[in-house]
Image (cartoon, helix red, strand yellow):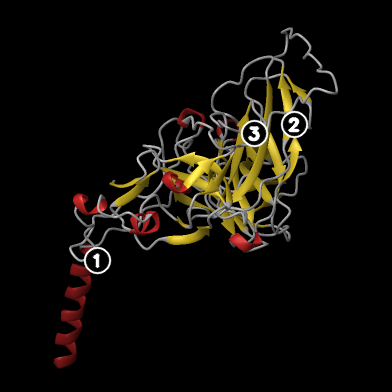
Amino acid sequence: MKIKTLLVFFGICMVIFLGGCDMPSDPLPLIHCPPGELVAPQLGTPYSWSTIDDTTPTLIASYTAITYPYPAPSLAYDCFVQKYHFYLSTGPDFTDEIGGVSNSGFWTSAPLQPGEMYRWAAAAISEDIEGPMSSYSYFFIGPDCAVSEMVAPILLEPADDAVVGELHPTLTWENPLECHPTHYWVDLSTNPSFPNVANGGQSPGPATYYQPSSALVNCETYYWRVKARGDGMGESGPFSEMRSFRVQETGTFCLAPIEMPELIETVPPGPPEFRGLMNANCRSNPWVLNNEVGFLPEGGIAILLGLNQDASWGFFKLMNDRECWVIMSAVEQQPPGSTLDPSLYPVIAHDSQPEPTEESAPPPASSCSQITDPRKCEAESACYWNKDANACKAK
């Protein structure tokens, strides 16, 4: 009797269970995407302008189906691509092709060269027909360079004294190291002493090329040089050699440059030198707050690279190639009696000055005038020595 009761109970449960469940629906069709309706894949990693240590990176692309049922969008599994064609080439000229074809959206390259820049893209293949290619993405192989490792870049194009036929020429150079800086800085000026580098600027990441954002002047000669830079203020390597090129836009006529007699000096003098009037600390920012990173001795020589907003501090290059800030009252332009023209120098960006704490609050302005020793005056954060008045003044 118990067995019959259990069987009846079990049968009722099965009826209830089956009645409450729907049978699984047929899966959506899995077909190759129509070749004539293929679109460009989306690129994943490596991300553009990234630096990676892996010399055999895996390139990743994905494809979102939008053609089945056409023309309405659909999920990616409604149709799928047969293969992916991964394009890969070596910078800076990208004339080789070292990519390959994969049955999936993943493809691992052969060993790549540390220190080089690479460009990659992908295209989908369906029924052995290749669709449109994606846009290019760029990456770099190698670790980040320490400041001590940075060397002068090797200039490539334009060649020295070349004539270029466009107003937005691309300047290229070579990184001789197996590591990469954070970026490069390009000086570009009509004056070989580079008093104004308004046409210069920063490369996109560690890319070894630069294109000026504003048009250059037709029939003008330009001078350029490049150096590697790190993340921090003053973290940079040495400049490359200097080169020149002449702009002559295609289809225009320029008068030939006048050749000066050999006995006449044709190269303008270099940037003016400044001599230290007293021992002065060279600082990481244009203020006095325990931020000494260098030292300019009395009588020492430094090159002015730029100024802060009110021209009270100068960003100098010392004889040991360190770049840092020195207060302008501590130096004198050479030769003696020369007048400084702030408009000839760029304004150099710097960190914001922190608010003084109660413990480190500067002395009252009236106390500056009571100091008669120039060195003691410069040692006070709220004071500076006024050479014209030969007196200590409040900042």
Query: Of tags 3 and 1, which is closer to the observer?
Result: 3
Q: Amino acid at mark 1?
A: Leu
> Which numbered disc, 3 or 1, marks the residue that appears first in the sequence?
1
Element marked by disc 2: loop
Say which residue appears at 37% left-offset and 50% top-offset.
351
State if disc 1 and disc 2 touch (CB < 8 Å).
no
* Whether residue 104 is visible: no
Q: Position of residue 100 (x, y in %)?
A: 71, 50
Q: Which residue is mark 2?
A: 158
The answer to which quarter of the image holds residue 141 is: bottom right
Type of amino acid at the residue the image marks with label 3: Ser
The picture places residue 35, in percent across and down from the top left corner, at 61, 35
Seen from the viewer's position, the closer of residues 32 and 59 is 59
Q: Residue furthest right?
A: 262
Measure how far apart labels 3 and 2 are at the Cα level. 19 Å
Q: What residue lies at 57% left-to-right and 33% top-to-bottom?
A: 200
Of labels 2 and 1, the one closer to you: 2
**Disc 3 and disc 1: Cα gap in Å?**
89 Å
Residue in the picture at 70% in, 45% down = 240
Residue indicated by mark 3? 193
Work out whether mark 3 precedes mark 2 in sequence or the reverse, and give the earlier one. Answer: 2
Question: Marks 2 and 3: in contact by CB < 8 Å?
Answer: no
- Marks 2 and 1, how far apart in space? 79 Å
Residue 18's tag is: 1
Q: Residues within 10 Å of mark 3 (few under 14, many from 20)?
A: some
Q: Contact, CB < 8 Å: mark 3 with mark 1?
A: no
Q: Nearer the viewer, residue 265 or 17?
A: 265
Classify 159 as above or below 236.
above
Could you tell me which secondary element the residue under label 1 belongs to?
helix
Please indicate whether residue 68 sits to the left or right of residue 107 in the image. Answer: left
Quadrant in the rendering for residue 304: top right
